[in-house]
Every structure is written in structure tokens, then in C-alpha cells.
């Protein structure tokens, strides 16, 4: 059974930082591209950042230069370092495969709230 468990969210002031983690189980983590996604109230879920099995990264234009995705294959964990946070980054953040072609893998997500 595949499980993706996100953690690290919270309330932060604009300009602050957070580091999200996503621990994976039930998949051969090292061969899978992984992604971070987010869904703000009233909006569709969108890709934030993706990382290939080899470490190639891809970012949404809105977070380029502020967010960094990374992975630790030994720990089966993908991270999202978020700096210079803005109120518009407020959302529930999820991880999944990249692209997210398996709906069943969505977890509970972790809430990120950025106050102005």
C-alpha cells in the first residue's frame, strides 16, 4: 500500500520560511519522479515543483527563485524548502508522483498559511 505523508506546514509571516517533508512508503522511491502540489481555497490543485529520479528540477513560475525541491532516496523523502513566502502561497500542500497520474496516492496534505 502506497502512503505519502506530508508534514512541516504551519503559520508564518510574509517573508518567512518553511520546510515541508513528504515521507513515502510502498513505492520504489528512487526510480520515481516526485512533485509538490498545492491547492488554495476555491482554486484547482497546481504543480509547485517536480524532481526527477536523477535530480532534475522543475518549478512553477510563481515560485522560481524562492522554493527548492530536493530528495533523499535513502530516507524515501522529498522536501520543499520555501523562502520569501507570500500570502498567495497560502494553500494545502501535497506530494505525489510527478506527474501525478495516480489519484489514489494523494494524502492529507499539510496546511501552509502566510500572513501579511
Image (tube, rainbow, N blue to C red):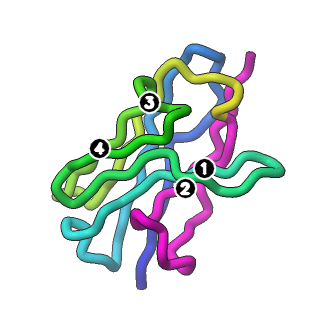
Left or right side of 28 for 40: right
State the mark number for residue 94.
2
Task: Give the mark nearest the N terminus, 2 or 3.
Answer: 3
**Residue 62 in the image: x percent, y percent?**
55, 32
> Residue placed farthest to the right in the image?
42
For residue 68, which quarter of the picture? top left
Task: Give the mark nearest the N terminus, 4 or 3.
Answer: 3
Q: Residue at x 36, y 66 (%)?
A: 24
Image quarter of the C terminus: top right
For the residues bearing labels 1 and 3, Cβ distance under 8 angstroms: no
Q: Residues within 10 Å of mark 4 (few under 14, many from 20)?
A: many
Q: Would you name the residue on which mark 4 appears?
A: 70
For the residues bearing labels 1 and 2, Cβ distance under 8 angstroms: yes
Q: Secondary structure at mark 2?
A: strand
Task: Give the mark nearest the N terminus, 4 or 2.
Answer: 4
How much space separates mark 2 and mark 3, taking CA atoms? 18 Å
How much space separates mark 4 and mark 3, taking CA atoms? 14 Å
For the residues bearing labels 4 and 2, Cβ distance under 8 angstroms: no
Q: Secondary structure at mark 4?
A: strand
Q: Is residue 16 above or below residue 99?
A: above
State the mark number for residue 38.
1
Q: Is residue 62 magenta?
A: no
Magenta part of the protein: which range?
90-116
Task: Give the mark nearest the N terminus, 1 or 3.
Answer: 1
> Residue placed farthest to the bottom in the image?
1
Q: Would you name the residue on which mark 3 appears?
A: 64
Left or right side of 62 for 65: left
Amino acid at each position: 500500500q502506497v502512503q505519502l505523508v506530508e508534514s512541516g506546514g504551519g503559520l508564518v509571516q510574509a517573508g518567512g520560511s518553511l520546510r515541508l517533508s513528504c515521507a513515502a512508503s510502498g513505492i520504489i522511491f528512487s526510480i520515481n519522479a516526485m512533485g509538490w502540489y498545492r491547492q488554495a481555497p476555491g482554486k484547482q490543485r497546481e504543480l509547485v515543483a517536480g524532481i526527477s529520479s536523477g535530480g532534475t528540477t522543475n518549478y512553477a513560475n510563481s515560485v522560481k527563485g524562492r522554493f527548492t525541491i530536493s530528495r533523499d532516496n535513502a530516507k524515501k523523502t522529498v522536501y520543499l524548502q520555501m523562502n520569501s513566502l507570500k500570502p498567495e502561497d497560502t494553500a494545502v500542500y501535497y506530494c505525489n508522483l510527478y506527474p501525478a497520474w495516480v489519484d489514489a496516492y494523494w494524502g492529507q496534505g499539510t496546511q501552509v498559511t502566510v500572513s501579511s
